[in-house]
Image: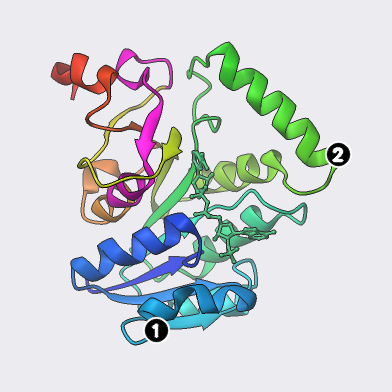
Amino acid sequence: MKKIGIVGASGKLGQYLIRHALERNYDVVGVCRPESVGKLDAYRDRITIVPGRTNEREVIRKAVAGCDGILTVLAPWGVEQYATGTAQAVLDFAPPGARLVFSCGWHITRDGKDIYSWKLKTFVKVFGWLARLFRFADLEDQVEACRRIFASDTRWTVVRGSDLEEGESEGLPVWSRHVGDPILESNLTRRVDFALFMVAALENDELVHEAPAIVGCQTPSALANRSQV
Ligand SMILES: NC(=O)c1ccc[n+]([C@@H]2O[C@H](COP(=O)([O-])OP(=O)(O)OC[C@H]3O[C@@H](n4cnc5c(N)ncnc54)[C@H](OP(=O)(O)O)[C@@H]3O)[C@@H](O)[C@H]2O)c1
């Protein structure tokens, strides 16, 4: 792995992705919306920045050329199928054989076997309804984006994040195939470690065609179920 693309590089998760990627000495190409380029000033001299909306196909085509791996933040924001357009462009233009790693939340299910708490179900229902009503986000867009990824024959991994918090890294999160598994019960991951898991997945072929749901490795449920890892 030498050159990697980060699609959605200017957000909180995206900037942690850049940090981990540079620590691994990857050449980094970051894509972010033109109005957000300034957020990447700290990295301006160390990465190539491609300004553009991540669902613009020409922007993605140019940015991912020659990349061995592509990390994509699937943003549920807006009501114009931003996440779906972003995922489709990455799937279409990624060089053959490239490792593709996408971010989303626990609410995405790959096989319908996840068991959700009433709290998560209520949040998704209420947030989804309010988001559609006020047209600031569309959770169905992220669902559709992931449906297309799951159906693709590229070398994908979809990393499903728990609730997130800021703070120093605690180490690589642990994961399980299904929300509802005891190891995930704590439902909390440091955002910096969500990014760490995504970057590590680039070099972990065991995660190809998996949709790991992750949780912090120091959380009570991870510590109590260590033997499952
Ligand atoms: N927040 C959570 O608790 C949580 C929990 C589980 C999973 N996740 C997943 O983690 C990933 C990133 O989440 P995050 O909370 O850490 O946020 P984040 O890193 O700040 O990412 C938000 C992204 O959305 C973009 N964005 C913001 N407003 C937008 C708009 N109106 N139209 C298009 N793009 C817009 C941002 O780009 P700009 O820099 O250009 O604004 C940024 O790339 C997502 O895939 C999310 O599903 C989050």
With respect to residue 64, does 194 lie above or below?
A: above
Three-letter code, disc 2: Leu
* Residue ID at (55%, 44%): 146
Residue indicated by mark 1 = 44
Q: Nearer the viewer, residue 93 or 26?
A: 26
* Residue ID at (28%, 17%): 221
Q: How far apart are marks 1 and 2 (CA)?
A: 38 Å
Q: Looking at the figure, which quarter contains the C terminus?
A: top left
- Along the polypeptide, which appears first: circle 1 or circle 2? 1
Residue 18: where, in percent of width, then height? 34, 66
Residue 157: where, in percent of width, then height? 38, 46
Q: Is residue 206 left or right of residue 126?
A: left
Q: Nearer the viewer, residue 56 or 120?
A: 120
Give yes or no for contact between labels 1 and 2 (Cβ–Cβ under 8 Å).
no
With respect to residue 59, does 124 lie above or below?
A: above
Q: What stretch is highlighted in magenta?
A: 179-196
Residue 161 at least partly seen:
no
Q: Is residue 185 magenta?
A: yes
Residue indicated by mark 2 = 133
Residue 222: where, in percent of width, then height? 24, 22
Dividing the picture into quarters, in which one does residue 121 lie? Answer: top right
With respect to residue 107, does 74 lie above or below?
A: below
